[in-house]
Amino acid sequence: MTVEAAHRWGSFLDSVVVYEQGALCRRLAKGSVPPGGGVRVTGLPRSLEPGSLRARVTGVRGVSVSEARVVVEAEPLGSPAPEGLQDEVERLRNECAAAQGRRDHQLRLIEEVGALRPVPPARRREDPHRRTPVDAWLELADFVDERLTGLHTRLVELEDALRRAERELGIAVDRLAHTSTDAPSAHLATTVAAHVIVDVSTTDDPQAEVELELEYTVPGAVWVPAYRLTCRQGGGTGRLVLRASVAQRTGEDWTGVSVGLATADLRRGTGLPRLRSLRIGRSQPPSAPTGWREPPAGLAGLFAGYDAAGRQPDATAVPVPSASAPPPPAPQAYGAPPTLPAPGAALEPLVGHMPAPSRSARARTGDGRGPGGRPSAVPVPSAPAALGKTAPPMSPAPTAGPPQPSGDELDYANLVLCGPDEQGGRRGRLFPGSPFDPVATEYRRRAESVASLPLPGHAVRVRESAGSFDHRFDTAARADIPSDGTWHTVTIGEIAVGVHTEYLCAPALEQTVYATSVLRNATDQALLAGPVEVSVDGDYLLTAALPTLAPGEVRRVGLGPAEGIQVTRRTNLRESTSGLRNNTTVLDHRVHVELANRLAGPVSIEVRERVPVTSEPDVRIEERADWSVPEEGAGPDLHAPGTRLWRVDLPAGGSAVLDGGYEIRMPAGKALVGGNRRS
C-alpha cells in the first residue's frame, strides 16, 4: 500500500435527517492514523454546502480533530465511459427527427399528386371549339387515385413509425430526467473529500484504530407526511401507519441509511442576538466590540522576501471584484489635481485572527477613519478643483472611541485570507466573503430544483402543517432513497389511535348521509396533515386528507357518502297573527326528518339543523324540538350561530323519525331581511 493510499479512508453514509428543505448527513470512516495525522476521507457529495463540514473522533479518548476542510479533486477517467442514457436520448432524438422528415416528405408528395389537374391548351381566336377528351380526363383521375392510394398507405406506415419513435424518445427523456445524479460525468471524475488532521499526541496508543464522524448539510431534499389507516367496522381502535414521501437530488444515493424527518428550517440562523444596552444619563463612549483587537504593524515587510524573489503581482491582471473591494479610481481630467487615496488605504496593516474594517465599509459610513477607528492623516479634497487650481485640503475632525467594525467583519466563519498575489493592498488581510466555486454552485442549483416538485394528492408542506412547533420523526428501519428527484415512500412506524365511525347529514342542504372517521391522537407526538389511505375490514375504501392532530386532539376525516343510509326531510310553514289587535305575526315552522339504516351493523348518526337568530329586541324565536346546542370547543364547522344537533343510534335495519320546529314572532309591520319566510 502506497503512502497516498494509506492516507485515504473510505467512508459510508450512516444517517440522514431531512428538514423542510435540505438534509444533514452523517458519514463514518475508520482507520489507523498515519504519521502527521493527515487523513483524507472520500465519498462526499459535490453539492455539499460550504462551511457546513464538521468532524470528530468517536470511541477513543485522547484523540481529537484539529482541522477539517473540504478538498475537491478531479481526474480523467481511465477508460471511456459506457453509453449512457444521454447518448440513448440523442440517438432516439435523431431517429425521431429522421422519421418526422420522412413523414413530411410523404405529405409533400401527396399534396403534389393531389394538385394534378387537366390543363387544356390555349385556343386561338380563329380556331374552332374542340371536344373535351373525356378518356384522358378519366385516365388522369384513375392515375391520381391509384397514386394517392399508395402514398396514403405509405403515409400510415410512416406515421406509425413516427409515433413509435416519439414514444421511445419520451420514455428515454423521462428516464434521463429521473435518473440518479450520483454518477460521474462522461469524461471527468470529480471527487469531494474531507481533509482531516487527527491529533493523537495525548493518547496512550497512537496506532489504535479510530473512527471519524463527519457531518455536513446538502440542499435538494424535501419530504411530506403520509399515512395508512386500517380499522374494523364497529371497533374502537385502529392502526395508523406513519409514512413519508421523500424526494432528494443531492448527488449521492442514500443506500441503507437511517432516515430522520424534521419540520425545522435547516437554514435558519442560530447565532445569538446582540443586545445593546440603553443608558440614561451622561453620554459615554461606546464599548469595544467583543473579539476585536488592534491590528499589528509590519504588513509592508511581511511580503518583502516574496517580492524580492521576483514573484511580483501581474500589473496587467484584472482583479476579481468582491463585496469588500474598493471601487476602481475614476479617470482624471486634464489639468485636474491627482486623486488622493481613500482614507486608510495605505495605513491598513495585517490582521491576525481578527479583521480590520474594510475600506468599503468605511466608505459607506463616511466617517473618514483609518484602521482601528483612528482618524486618517490623509487629506481628502472636499470638491473637484478648477482647472489649474487645487482646493485646500481639509482634515476630518478626530472622533474619540474604540473602532466600530461592521457585522460582516466580525463574521469570522465567512472571512477569507487574501493571498500574496492580491492587489490594491488586500494581500495578507482578512476580508468578508467566501471563495466562489461556479461548479459547486451549479450542482447546488440543480439540487434545489427538487423543491418545486409537485406534491402528492392531499399532501401539505411540513412547515404549513407544523405551525409554530417543530417535530422530528425517525424511521424504524434503514431505507434506500436514490438521488433521482422523484417521490419515494418510507415507513416511519405504526401507532394505535382511537377511531370510530360516525355519520353526518345536513338534510336542509342535501339529503345525503356522509360517513366520517373520528380519530383521537393518544400519543405524545403530533400527527401532521397529509394524505391517509383508509382500509375498513381489510378492504381499501379511499384516500382522504388527514388534518394536523396535536397530542390528545380529536378530529374528523370524511369518508364519502354512505349509500346504505337514507334520509328524508319535509317542512311545513303556518302563518298566523296574534295579540289584542293582531299586531304580531307568527311564523310556525315544522321540520320532519326520517332516517333508515340499510347497513349490516348499527350506526350513530348526527343530524344537523339550523334555526334563525336575531338581534332585534321585538323579534322572538321559540324552539320546539329536542335537539341540542353544540358543546363548547366543538369543531370549526359547528361554530355558526343557530346550529342544532340531533344524535340518533340506529340498529341494523332500523329507522327513526325526528320532529322539530320553531316559531318566529315579530311585529306585523316588519319583514324578514336576508332570509326566506318558508325555509
Image (tube, rainbow, N blue to C red):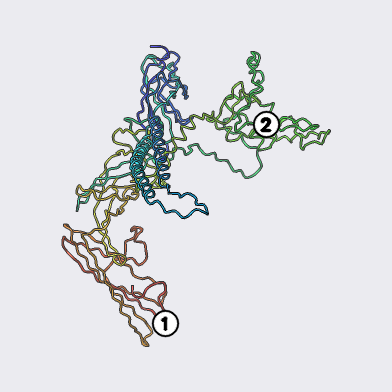
Question: Looking at the rendering, which quadrant does residue 642 occupy?
Answer: bottom left
| Image x and y of residue 417, in percent | 57, 25
Q: Secondary structure at mark 1?
A: loop
The residue identified by callout 1 is: 669
Q: Is residue 592 above or below residue 61?
A: below
- Determine whether, in the image, residue 234 is placed left or right of residue 523: left
- Determine whether, in the image, residue 656 is placed left or right of residue 12: left
* Furthest residue toward top: 2
Res. 328 mark: 2
Question: Looking at the rendering, which quadrant does residue 649 occupy?
Answer: bottom left
* Quarter placement of the N terminus: top left
- Residue 528 in sight in this render: no
Give me the residue at 42% from left, 47% from top: 116
Question: Looking at the rendering, which quadrant does residue 45 occupy?
Answer: top left
Q: Residue type at mark 1?
A: Gly
| Image x and y of residue 388, in percent | 83, 33
**Structural crowding at the residue carrying mark 2, measured as other residues with C-alpha within 10 Å and reported as few (<14), some (14–19) or many (≥20):** few
Q: Is residue 88 above or below residue 454?
A: above
Q: Residue type at mark 2?
A: Pro
| Image x and y of residue 291, in percent | 57, 30
- Determine whether, in the image, residue 119 is placed left or right of residue 568: right
Per the model, the C-alpha gap separating discs 1 and 2 is 86 Å
Mark 1 vs 2, N-terminal side? 2
Q: Secondary structure at mark 2?
A: loop
Give me the residue at 39% from left, 23% from top: 81
- Determine whether, in the image, residue 399 is placed left or right of residue 93: right
**Structural crowding at the residue carrying mark 1, measured as other residues with C-alpha within 10 Å and reported as few (<14), some (14–19) or many (≥20):** few
| Image x and y of residue 602, in percent | 18, 58
Res. 15 mark: none
- Residue 457 in sight in this render: yes
In-front residue for pair 83/661: 83
* Quarter placement of the C terminus: bottom left
